[in-house]
């Protein structure tokens, strides 16, 4: 069977590379993975291997959230997304490394393209494992840039659906206004199959216009020259494929939401982590403790004002997309190639889109000056995930498959 | 100390009445409760006793969700709302009875005003325990009508804040589009204190206009004569207190959202319960299994269309409230007095408001023809919880304290 030989390939790859890439917190035995893959199950993900970010509950492997507070923590049930994927035929091979609480403290995982570089975060292990051929697909979560950024740094497809389209039951909360389950695959076809499996979408999808907006964003100053190049190159490829690409002016509603999102994130994190703060402060890293101190200072009125800003921006974005007939905006995924391992990189090009709650996808396109992956982000509008995935499929074929 | 003697009163009440009312799934020992109450803690909820609905995680008592699947299930940490309340000084006395998964199957709890009547659901034990003087306050959750309805049937104040204002971390998901933590208290002052403790609101609050809309709703045909009476009586009391009460015509956006909410609820429930469905179907009640069958038939396109309807309704509601300068709409909480124990009663007057995500509060007003509590619901607009609570405080004093 094809999927069986793929699984054997992946296990070989883990065996060779795990000590270097360090994508996994815990894994099932090779024997158990092979046995589970052999037990053919009818479903759209039949025979797929799946890594699960270690902030997502699994009944058969611990969920430690990258924190000493949760060492050995064994949930009694699967998160809803994991149960849905397993029911569709997927075989969970293991839990992937996350930063502490899916925040910004780097963990052990390295970028498979260069072990001195970060894989990005917080879904570090999921992106690295898929990029390194150790697993076919992997779940991540995104609250600011935790799917798109590691997908960019590792050179795989990373997708964050519309917020709330898929259940977060059994996924650790960070900031409920933004948290979304997403996933990594090596191409758009797999990404779309996963979407259909989890949402039970039928074959039909929304009308596709063939019209994309090129949007450099208020954070453009953070873009390295190679990022400007990959945006240009991608737009040219799209135009060559017959897609209309329109330059879009900076939108005021996308400027103000940048700071508002940060206010909301901090207000919520302080309350979401009430248990950990009051019971295990000594087991929380200094970096996160300092974040809690800043967060504690945010008052309800500031939060409410930020929520009002966010709400207007959400409405304005969809109106803007509809008025212009855009399937997607094309915009940077990250400032440039993966930086070195001291940080997980900058989510400056992700925060606005995540806070809007709209679907967004990273597509790898080429390699940068250091030979590391570069790509672009396509951003859709609320509930138009299938239209975005259709646009992404077309874009991917216009770019040529990476690497 | 005043709070100590109150605690002793409550424990006496539990001792006398628990075998009849059956509000509790599990409790700490009287000794431990007294000890915890004596250990004075500085905070806005200092000395308060608190019941916690058994779908909300607590590190020191199991969380069984009203389901044999979760018997003995012991979480390792508190839900965020519980940790926040404890940090503010509250003493958790026990877990309160919920219907299975916070859905509609009646459980053991009886209405403290008449043991042949339902306390309402799904936050049955929380409403009954507060109404019966067994605890000062109790957390519930509302996805359709699970706070407002039991508050109405038991004759206590029940409050559901704006959706997403407070974290749901550690609270079992039912339908993520709607789930909200709320609480029961015996008066509005306690309700508002709880809100400030959890949200860290400062003293100031939004401008209060003294203007309320009387809204009978598209579901008015379900209202018993005593419900029409209590609405009239409440409006008269408000007007006597100098509040302007305006008759509001039926709003089309509030009609369409009724069915849309049901579609969303079913689509989400089918996915949220993927684990329970695929691992423990035999331990799920027939009523809920049949709900899953109906739910499985809903396709993504229907869900997306319902989400579009919901979104428009949410925008229209806030515009409508702002344009009219309403502090609140006054509308029924339930069709009438608590029915007998075969069901938990009808949530027909709750679904629209919960689906909008706006804050809503039940206020007890009087007794009905069978001597059971009757009251009204005040509904606000998004993020205007403090304004609604201010209106509720004024309304409560205009009604006179119940009972």
Image: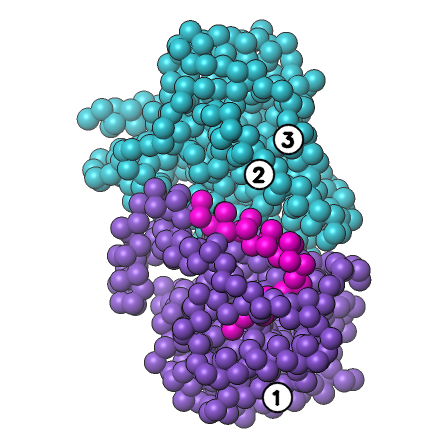
Chain colours: A purple, B cyan
Q: Is residue B221 above or below residue A171?
A: above
| Residue drawn at the location 47% of the way across and 45% of the way down | B164
Kindly indicate the quadrant of the structure image that contains residue B2. Answer: top left
Residue position for label 1: A403
In reply to whether residue A310 is colored magenta, the answer given is: yes
Find numbered disc 2 in the image and state the secondary structure of the residue it sits on: helix
**Residue under pointer 2:** B314
Name the one closer to the observer, B383 or B280. B383
**B26 versus A23 height, above or below:** above
Mark 2 or mark 3: which comes first in sequence?
3
The main secondary structure of the magenta stretch is: helix
Pointer 1 and pointer 3: residues touching (CB < 8 Å)? no
- Identify whether B153 is placed above or below A239: above
Is residue A53 depicted above or below A372 in this figure?
above
Q: Which residues are magenta?
A: A308-332
Determine the chain carrying the residue at label 2.
B
Residue that appears at 74% across and 63% down = A208
Residue B233 in percent (x, y) is at: 51, 8
x, y (%) of residue B200?
31, 41
Quarter of the N terminus of chain B within the rendering = top left
- In reply to whether residue B273 is colored magenta, the answer given is no
Q: Which residue is mark 3?
A: B254
Chain assignment, label 3: B
Inter-mark Cα distance, 1 to 2: 45 Å
Marks 2 and 1: in contact by CB < 8 Å?
no
Residue B218 appears in view: yes
Q: Residues within 10 Å of mark 3 (few under 14, many from 20)?
A: some
């Amino acid at each position: 069977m094809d999927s069986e030989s793929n699984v054997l390939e992946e296990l070989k790859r883990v065996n060779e590379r795990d000590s270097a890439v360090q994508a996994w917190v815990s894994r099932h035995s090779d024997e158990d993975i092979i046995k589970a893959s052999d037990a053919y199950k009818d479903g759209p993900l039949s025979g797929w291997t799946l890594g699960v970010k270690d902030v997502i509950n699994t009944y058969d492997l611990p969920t430690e959230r990258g924190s000493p507070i949760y060492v050995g923590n064994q949930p009694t049930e699967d998160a809803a997304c994991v149960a849905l994927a397993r029911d569709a035929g997927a075989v969970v091979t293991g839990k992937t490394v996350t930063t502490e609480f899916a925040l910004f403290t780097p963990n052990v995982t390295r970028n498979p393209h260069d072990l001195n570089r970060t894989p990005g975060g917080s879904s570090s292990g999921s992106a690295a494992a898929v990029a390194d051929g150790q697993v076919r697909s992997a779940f991540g979560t995104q609250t600011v840039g935790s799917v798109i950024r590691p997908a960019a740094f590792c050179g795989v497809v990373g997708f964050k659906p519309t917020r709330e389209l898929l259940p977060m039951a059994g996924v650790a909360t960070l900031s409920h206004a933004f948290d979304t389950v997403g996933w990594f695959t090596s191409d758009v076809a797999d990404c779309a199959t996963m979407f259909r499996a989890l949402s039970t979408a039928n074959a039909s999808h929304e009308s596709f216009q063939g019209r994309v907006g090129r949007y450099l964003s208020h954070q453009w100053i953070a873009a390295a020259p190679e990022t400007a190049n990959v945006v240009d190159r991608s737009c040219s490829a799209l135009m060559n494929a017959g897609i209309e690409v329109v330059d879009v002016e900076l939108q005021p509603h996308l400027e103000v939401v940048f700071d508002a999102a940060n206010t909301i994130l901090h207000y919520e994190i302080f309350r979401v982590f009430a248990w950990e703060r009051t019971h295990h402060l000594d087991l929380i890293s200094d970096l996160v403790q300092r974040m809690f101190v800043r967060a504690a200072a945010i008052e309800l009125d500031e939060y409410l004002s930020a929520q009002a800003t966010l709400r207007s921006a959400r409405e304005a974005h969809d109106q803007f997309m509809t008025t212009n007939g855009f399937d997607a905006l094309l915009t940077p995924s990250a400032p440039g190639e993966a930086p070195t391992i001291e940080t997980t990189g900058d989510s400056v090009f992700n925060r606005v889109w995540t806070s809007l709650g709209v679907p967004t996808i990273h597509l790898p396109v080429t390699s940068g000056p250091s030979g590391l992956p570069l790509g672009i982000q396509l951003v859709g509008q609320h509930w138009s995930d299938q239209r975005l995935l259709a646009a992404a499929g077309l874009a991917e074929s216009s770019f040529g498959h990476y690497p």
